[in-house]
Image (cartoon, rainbow, N blue to C red):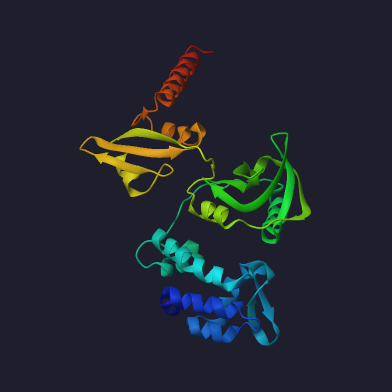
Amino acid sequence: MNHNGLEAAADVAYLAEQLRQLDEPEGVAAQALARALAVPEQALRRELARLGTLIETLPEQRLRLGEAGRGPWQSHAQAAPAAIEAMKAMLPAGGLRCLMALLDSLERSSYQPQGHHYEAFKSAHSVFRQLDEAIRQRRVCTFEHLATPQRIQPYRLANRQGFWHLIGVEAQRLTSYDLERVKELRVTDESYEADPAIEAEIAGADDVWFSPKQTEVILYVRQPVAPYFKRHSVLPEQRIRHEDELGLLISTRVTHPDQFVPVVKRWMPHVFVLEPKNLAARLRHDVHLYSDVLRGVGDGV
């Protein structure tokens, strides 16, 4: 695929203009869009086909956003620059050109991103489809989660570390659910008004744990792994308080121990919890328990 036009498209305003044309009722001519992007029309159609029902073909070979992709343009226009900039920040120098190289031919590409192994479960298609429609149509949902009946206003489907979660409001409280454990899902006819404050809180969150009460945790990260904590936030709301030749003093804010304890264990023995004392004691207990298990395995238990 010719990437010259796509390099120019890295300009956020240019990309937004192409999206704006797709959002128009009459759509945009496929040939004109391909010419504007300097890519073969067949290649453009191939890439757009990956979006499924998000793109629909109109008479006279025109393209338009499908029902699933439509919405108030202002909201899309405001979100697009941030999303594109985040995408560009993820990639090495060359930005969107590198992304298109990946899409064009992974087997011939010099890039090989390796992310999380995302879970796959049998009910995924049905559950995702129902929840996607419920979120778009603002419909209240009922289901069972861990054998407990739930009635929520669904807001988002989010993936955290390879696992899917449903984020919504239950009894005026923002919370999340492990999607694999959502059973007996039913989308009701009851509608609700989306709360802008809730939308903003979800958009600004860097995790799927929500609670008005948070606990500050202070940790020390030793030098062998400290560079990884400097390159990006390993923990939610991570802040580097102090740095010396031995490592980093870091703070994080969490709503539940399970939000960060597994992460800390992954980086042991180079990460230590200093405060609060009860969480530090829990980790010491888990380490001793693990040591006892190892001794039992060594003794043939």
In the rendered structure, the answer to whether residue 160 lies left or right of residue 9 reads right
The quadrant where residue 271 appears: top left
In the rendered structure, the answer to whether residue 125 lies left or right of residue 99 reads right
Q: Position of residue 235 (x, y in %)?
A: 42, 41
Q: Position of residue 238 (x, y in %)?
A: 38, 43
Decide: is 65 above or below 174. below
Decide: is 208 above or below 2. above
Residue 2 visible within the image: no
Task: Name the residue at 63% across, 68% down.
Answer: 69
Q: Position of residue 260 (x, y in %)?
A: 46, 36
The quadrant where residue 180 appears: top right
Decide: is 189 above or below 16. above
Furthest-right residue in view? 189
Task: Name the residue at 30% across, 40% down.
Answer: 226
Q: Position of residue 193 (x, y in %)?
A: 67, 58
Furthest-left residue in view? 245
Name the one closer to the observer, 300 or 277.
Answer: 277
